[in-house]
Amino acid sequence: QVQLVESGGGLVQAGGSLRLSCAASGRTFSTYVMGWFRQAPGKEREFVALIRGTGASTYSANSVKGRFTISRDNAKNTVSLQMNSLKPEDTAVYYCKADRYGLGSEVYWGQGTQVTVSS
């Protein structure tokens, strides 16, 4: 069982930055592909970025490429999302996801953190 706790959300003006963090419980953190997803009001949850266990590979949605950076610290069991040049359309609840080995058979979600970008 893995518990995920997100933090770092808040209200920011367009063009500003925020850094989200997700702290994971457990001793096998490096076996999990970690990802960030977001869900805006009235919309489906969508993929934002993911990072593989070693941190060597990352993938981002086209909508955030060049603005958001995902990273992880396996020694601290944390994954972060640095968000720069924020836009009002980035407003959403951001969720952290853990997927063991990236297989989709053992998946955990955090409770979400609200990010609001004002114009």
Image (cartoon, rainbow, N blue to C red):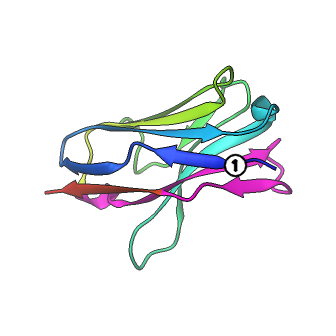
Give 31 or 76, whichever is nearer the viewer: 76
Tell me the residue that label 1 is attached to: 3
Are there few (<14), some (14-19), or many (20+) residues within 10 Å of tag 1? some
Q: How many marks?
A: 1
Give above or below for 8 relative to 53.
Answer: below
Residue 69 position, x and y percent, is: 45, 33
> At which x and y percent is residue 81?
46, 37
1 horizontally vs 89: left or right? right
At x 70%, y 34%, the residue is: 52
Q: Position of residue 100 (x, y in %)?
A: 81, 44
Q: Residue at x 76, y 39 (%)?
A: 32
Q: Is residue 104 magenta?
A: yes
What span is in magenta?
Answer: 88-112
- For image coordinates 56% across by 59% down, the residue present is 111
Residue in view at x 66 percent, y 41 percent: 34
Provide residue 79's location: percent of width, then percent of height. Answer: 57, 34
Q: Is residue 50 left or right of residue 27?
A: left
- Looking at this view, is 100 or 27 the one in front? 27
